[in-house]
Amino acid sequence: LFLWILEMVTPKSKSAALCIGEEQPKNCFTELQVLKGHFDIVRFLVQIDDFSLFASGSHNGELILWDTLDWTIQAYELILWEEAPGDGQSEIRMGQQKQTEMSIQHLTSDGELVVAAVGSGLYVYNAVMKMVVAYRKIAHDSDVLHTMLLDNGLVMSCSEDGSVRIWELQDLPLAAEPASSGFFGMFGTFGRSGKQAAGAPVKKLLDVPGLRSLELIGDLIGHSGAVQMFLSFGERALVTCSADHLLIVWKDGERESQLRSLALFEKLEEMQGL
């Protein structure tokens, strides 16, 4: 499938005002280039940095990074969840998966990392290093609908199951340190990066530089229907919307507790000063 690049053309109309019966101006966009690279429906686009790089995600799990200077492919990643057989291939095979389990529903980026919602899982790709840094096959009980990278490096996701979850990218343990069971349950092998040769050797998990774990640190339970998306207002609040017709405003409980404690101490100091 193709992506069409449109170029904006300034209309030559002398006046922006139109009267009834006058000829309407033509579309101010014209086709500039057609980008070929996907083999299924392209579902989502996201800008990665200041107009020089963007990513596209498709229904069959393809994540492609595009350069807007010459409109060429900078990186290609095929996201398939099943572990590869022991034949030396580094591709994660589908097995008997449903199509939605590998489809990219949403993409978000902070200029360095790209988070992809893939079925009920999350996939974190480093656009600078052009490699996967973390993923979790089952992040929710149903399809992930929306994701966000917060300013403090946390990842948020919401799902059809009505949950909103907060994840933290954590450094992997050293070779001599024990790893959590969640870490080992998170990874299989990686997808094919940059359309590498099928016979390329699979690296051991801890031998891959830059690899991190995606650990669950918060679960917001309040909606009874699918959570469609959310908005973050920094330290002030988080707003979620759902198919249950509700919007819920959430606050950072730890921060609110600290503010209450600070207010209490200030009140006590005032009372002692009287």
Image (tube, rainbow, N blue to C red):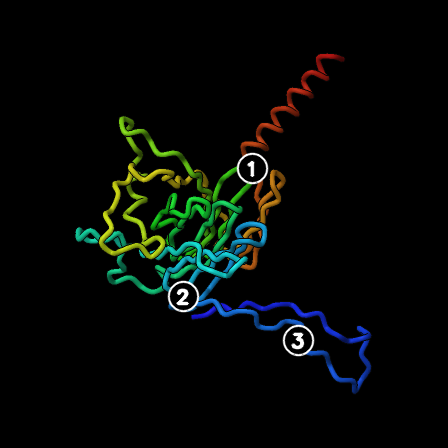
- The quadrant of the picture occupied by the C terminus is top right
Residue 189 vs residue 221, the one in the foreground:
189
Where is residue 176 drawn, in percent x and y? 27, 26
Mark seen at residue 252 = 1
CA–CA distance between discs 1 and 2? 40 Å
CA–CA distance between discs 2 and 3? 27 Å
Q: Amino acid at mark 2?
A: His
Q: Label 1: few (<14), some or many (≥20) within 10 Å? A: few
Where is residue 267 drawn, in percent x and y? 69, 21
Where is residue 21 drawn, in percent x and y? 79, 87
Please determine whether, in this image, residue 143 is positioned above or below residue 129: below
Please determine whether, in this image, residue 40 is positioned above or below residue 93: below
Q: Are marks 2 and 3 in contact (CB under 8 Å)?
A: no
Q: Amino acid at mark 1?
A: Asp
Q: Amino acid at mark 3?
A: Asn
Does residue 96 appear to the left or right of 58 in the view shown? left
In the image, what residue occupies the spot 39% across and 60% down? Answer: 62
At mark 3, the secondary structure is loop
Residue wearing tag 2: 38
